[in-house]
Image (tube, coloured by chain):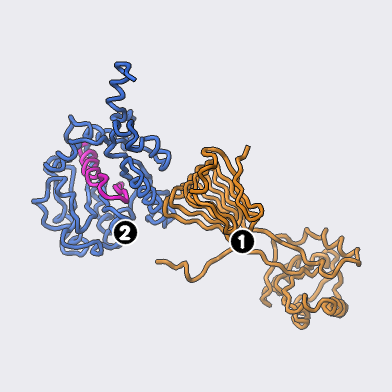
Amino acid sequence: MDQSSILDFRSGTFFAPILVLYNNDLEKIEQRLQEKIASAPDFFSSSPVLFDLSELNENDKKIDVEALISLLRRLSLFPVGIRGGDPSQEKRALELSVPVDSGRSRNDAILPEIQRKDDTMPEVQPVIREAVRAPAMMITQPVRSGQRIYAASDLVILAQVSAGAEIMAEGNIHVYNTLRGRALAGVQGDTAARFFCLDLQAELVSIAGIYKTSEDLKETPKKKPVQVYLRDQALIIEELS
Amino acid sequence: MARIIVVTSGKGGVGKTTTSAAIAMGLAKRGHKTAVIDFDVGLRNLDLIMGCERRVVYDFVNVINGEANLNQALIKDKNCNQLYILPASQTRDKDALNLEGVGRVLEELSKDFKYIVCDSPAGIEKGAYLAMYYADDAFVVTNPEVSSVRDSDRMLGILASKSRRAELNMEPIKEYLLLTRYDPDRVESGEMLGLDDVQEILSLHLLGVIPESKSVLNASNSGIPVILDEKSDAGQAYADVVARYLGEKKPLRFIDSKKGFLRKLFGGK
């Protein structure tokens, strides 16, 4: 019955440089790329890269996706996505096992625009941080004794959490009701994670592994909204006014 | 289609079998054809409470194993011709039941009956799991003390996650709270959890409060479901529960302390 030990899908964040192309001349691209790589070989060696064709396509400059992909691979880069391609380019990329990043294609050309005009920018500038945690997990039913909930994101609970239940989140936890069970926020070590609750009667609260048990929580106000956060390796429990 | 009701609690000795017998009889008395099944294989009690222990020939396990058909195993109640009892086997254990077999028996009963009451064994193991798996409604029987409340909470979690309705993403089991062995005097003196405390912890739809009563033991000993003792407080409380379950509005009774009432009456301290 229990198949949880075989695999898990977790949301995660993944960093990759985005290669924005303004010229469809493959020779010039290769030359410029080699210069870039030579300037920071450690950074670019075996690096995943997502290439963005939206500038080219806006100016009606077509590029051979197959040739581009093999060029990147020859320079020991790993193309992991295409963005801003036309349908035939996207199709060709998929055939070569390069997935299409469709979500935010085509209309985020503003950032590369600024970077192109400033040649003094450091080499690592094209790395755009796409830190997006998975959308918050929402629970509307009571979490009963013996139940465990794990969110690879923020966790929002609208019902009560009973004594003997355990709720865990990699991000923040919000309980818009009474908490009587155990609550662990920032379980992957996020010390900035916080915990919010309308009535704290918990058996245990923890942020990034630093915890207090109900024995230590006697002093906290009951039936009052509180937040819990970390300051200098100590859990601070504070009434929300 | 029949409505399948599980009477469950997690904890033992809180009044599951008494409740199963009472509400099954209550529903049948109102003209709904009802079957009540004892899932407590190995610790059979329902037949005693229903007063049919001398007429048991075949049981639930025989039906599941195909050694008897349902009509041979069902016992017609002697007080009400709309009520049938399917007893548990006393010589076997819970492993004699299986999910598929229980499903088959419930499906066959569903063709003929309006309500099927499943009397769950205590615990959260196989017997209790099989009793609640196919349920549409759950009567969670709870005593006003902390361990019973926590066990009920655990059982509610299982109802919400491991039942057929949960697994198939159907509308969840309707959960009702039944507070039994309630003693308003002891609540008043702080020896027992009050109705409000239990409600705050479980936040569940309250179907009724059954007062602690000598009539329950008397009924069990004589093999007549307590609901038939219309003069007793427990019997009346169970009749109210059945009425509320069927959608009638009934005010809560037997929840105020008699001592408190007298004190109010005579203006004592």
In this structure image, what is the colour of chain B?
blue
Tell me if residue B25 is in the magenta stretch: yes
Q: Is residue A134 above or below residue B249?
A: below
Give me the chain letter of mark 1: A
> Which SS class for mark 1?
loop
Instruction: Determine whether, in the image, residue B265 is placed left or right of residue A134.
Output: left
Instruction: Determine whether, in the image, residue A131 is placed left or right of residue B213.
Output: right
Please name the amino acid that badge 2 sits on. Answer: Glu
Please name the amino acid that badge 1 sits on. Answer: Gly
Identify the residue at horizontal 36%, vertical 51% (top origin): B155
- Location of mark 1 (residue): A189
Q: Residue B142's x, y, as percent?
A: 32, 43
Instruction: Please rate how many residues cluster around mark 2, counting C-alpha atoms within 10 Å: few if below 14, some from 14 to 19, many from 20.
Output: few
Q: Can residue B259 be seen in this view?
A: yes
Q: How far apart are marks 2 and 1 (CA)?
A: 36 Å
Looking at the image, which is closer to me, A57 or B183?
Answer: B183
In this structure image, what is the colour of chain A?
orange
- Location of mark 2 (residue): B125
Q: What stretch is highlighted in magenta?
A: B1-29
- Indicate the quadrant containing the N terminus of chain A: top left, top right, bottom left or bottom right: bottom left
Q: Are marks 2 and 1 in contact (CB under 8 Å)?
A: no
Looking at the image, which is closer to me, B115 or B20?
Answer: B20
Q: Residue A241's x, y, as percent?
A: 63, 37
Q: Residue B265's x, y, as percent?
A: 30, 17
